[in-house]
Image (tube, rainbow, N blue to C red):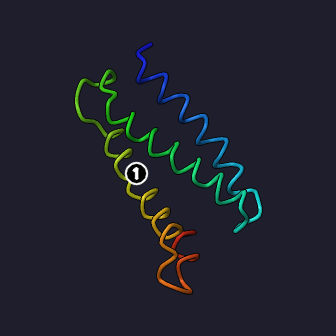
Amino acid sequence: MPIVARIHIGLAVAALVSGLLVTQGRKGTRCHRSVGWVYTGSMVGVNASALWIYRLTGEFSPFHVAALLSLATIVAGASFAWSRKPAGRWVGNHAY
């Protein structure tokens, strides 16, 4: 198995575990923020590594489109949490 596939799988497992923890735990705590950043980093890594995998079809595929869309939503959600703007509405935007 190529190293990029191993990295992809490892990051996917980390994203699944941290995603479960961040959604089931109490929101707004230090633990929620820390685990949320682990989730964010794992998902960025999963999507980046997905863009390097071409063995299934040998070309750009719907999986690559899904990785780009997922990356965009992760960046959007994390940017609201990081900037905490707009004031008073960032939590709703982050959750959405």
Q: What residue would you read off at disc 1?
A: 71
- Image vertical order of residue 25 relative to residue 44, above or below: below
Q: Amino acid at mark 1?
A: Leu
Tag count: 1
In the picture as drawn, the residue positioned furthest to the bottom comes out as: 88
**Where is residue 66 drawn, in percent x and y?**
38, 46
Q: Secondary structure at mark 1?
A: helix
For the point 76% across and 58% down, the residue is: 25
**Where is residue 7 drawn, in percent x and y?**
48, 27
For the point 28% across and 25% down, the residue is: 57
Quarter of the figure with the N terminus: top left
- Find residue 79 and report its image quarter: bottom left
**Where is residue 39 drawn, in percent x and y?**
58, 48
- Find residue 76 and report its image quarter: bottom left
Q: Is residue 42 left or right of residue 47?
A: right
In the picture as drawn, the residue positioned furthest to the top comes out as: 1
For the point 41% across and 24% down, the residue is: 4
**Where is residue 3 drawn, in percent x and y?**
43, 18
For the point 71% across and 61% down, the residue is: 30
In the picture as drawn, the residue positioned furthest to the left comes out as: 59
Q: Is residue 13 left or right of residue 3?
A: right
- Find residue 65 and report its image quarter: top left
- Image vertical order of residue 49 relative to residue 55, above or below: below
- Image vertical order of residue 16 relative to residue 73, above or below: above
For label 1, the crowd category at 10 Å Cα-Cα, with few meaning under 14, some 14 to 19 and many 20 or more, is some
